[in-house]
Amino acid sequence: MQRNPSRTSASTFTRRSVLLTCGAALAGGLLAPAQAAGQWPEKMIKMVVAFPPGGPTDTAARLVAQSLSERLGQNVIIENRAGASGSVGTSTFIKSPAAGYTLSMFGMPALLAPVLFKNNLYDVRKDFLPVATVYDLPMAIIVNPRVLPDVKDLPSLIAYAKKAEPSLNYTSSGTGSFGHLSMEQLKDLGGFDMQHVAYRGSAPAVTDLIGGQIPVMFADVVAALPHIQAGKLRAIAVSSNQAKLLLPGVKSVAEQGFPGFDADTWGGLIAPLGTPQAVVDRLNKELKVVLADPALQKKMLAAGAIARYQDGATMKARLANDFARWSKIANDKGISAQ
């Protein structure tokens, strides 16, 4: 029996249409996320900074945002959401849509904020996606040379502190700040004592340090650098070897009897959990290029920060290690922001 050519052709056409339609749908379903990520970015990107304008995290974020805008072909704008040492802005940020259009420049004060404020708003080890480290922020132990004229290095400060009656006072940018926690750890390692006097921010603390109301401070270098250069303050130790880029000639804490001691603060770019890997990879790639730019490095250094690229896996490990180190000190010493 001879087949009807028209029926055979129609049947074949129908089967082919179904198969092609199903195949296209399946391929579309599988490829849509990749295609969407490949098209990113298609609109403006918001970078949340959980601190006030003008600080080191904000400054670094603005420099990086400008460079990323040029490389991505879309504006990257800064949105400041300050409060509770960064925990307010960070806790809001982690709930943002994971589409690559809301990012955040994470600064170290937010690392321990949930511990210090006892609010448990987030866990830095699991509640967001580390993209890349962006900068290191060197610190230094600084004294007022009029109040402590014979203290010119860390050993002489420790010797003075051991003999002081009553105990020598020191300050930092605030309770639970990295300057506070770093000095508390150093006191334990060196077997000496000083009493912490809490200030609300670096600016008032540096003002009173210059005025002689407080003799010692463990501070971000950027907060005191102009006054060190003017001779009003003296840096006797820096937090790491790379801090010498800002204070050449000043020995590190590690070089003055405490091998391995490193207390730089730092910051990096984070994204909400679930952000497409292709977006994260693109950001990582662009940040590596941006942070290698000598012009940007120079601008960061002028702001007191050191451009430093580390990939997301390295940043994640660094977050976990720093959280373990500093939260233990805060808990052991009973340090709380409440």
Image (tube, rainbow, N blue to C red):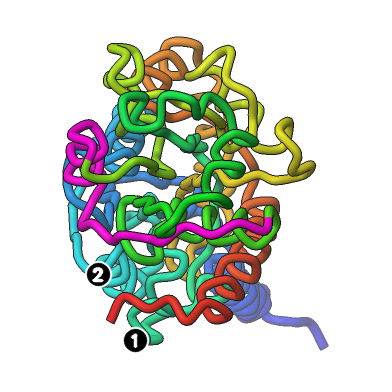
Which residue corresponds to the image point at 58% horizontal and 80% vertical from the top-left?
332
Q: Would residue 228 be found to the left or right of residue 132 on screen?
A: left
Q: Would residue 33 be found to the left or right of residue 41 on screen?
A: right
Does 219 appear in magenta? no
Which residue corresponds to the image point at 56% horizontal and 32% vertical from the top-left?
238
Q: Would residue 148 be found to the left or right of residue 150 on screen?
A: left
**Where is residue 220 drawn, in percent x and y?**
40, 38
- Name the residue type under label 1: Asn
Which label was assigned to residue 119?
1
Instruction: Tell me which numbered mark, 2 or 1, is placed earlier along the sequence.
Output: 2
Q: Is residue 122 above or below residue 90?
A: below
Helix, strand, or loop for circle 2? helix
Q: Is residue 48 above or below residue 158?
A: below
Disc 2 to disc 1, C-alpha distance = 10 Å
Q: Would residue 114 be found to the left or right of residue 248 on screen?
A: left
Q: Quadrant of the C terminus?
A: bottom left
Q: Magenta residues, as a range?
A: 191-212
Can residue 135 be spotted in the picture? no
Q: Is residue 125 above or below residue 41?
A: below
Which residue corresponds to the image point at 56% horizontal and 31% vertical from the top-left?
237
**Where is residue 239 drawn, in percent x and y?**
58, 38
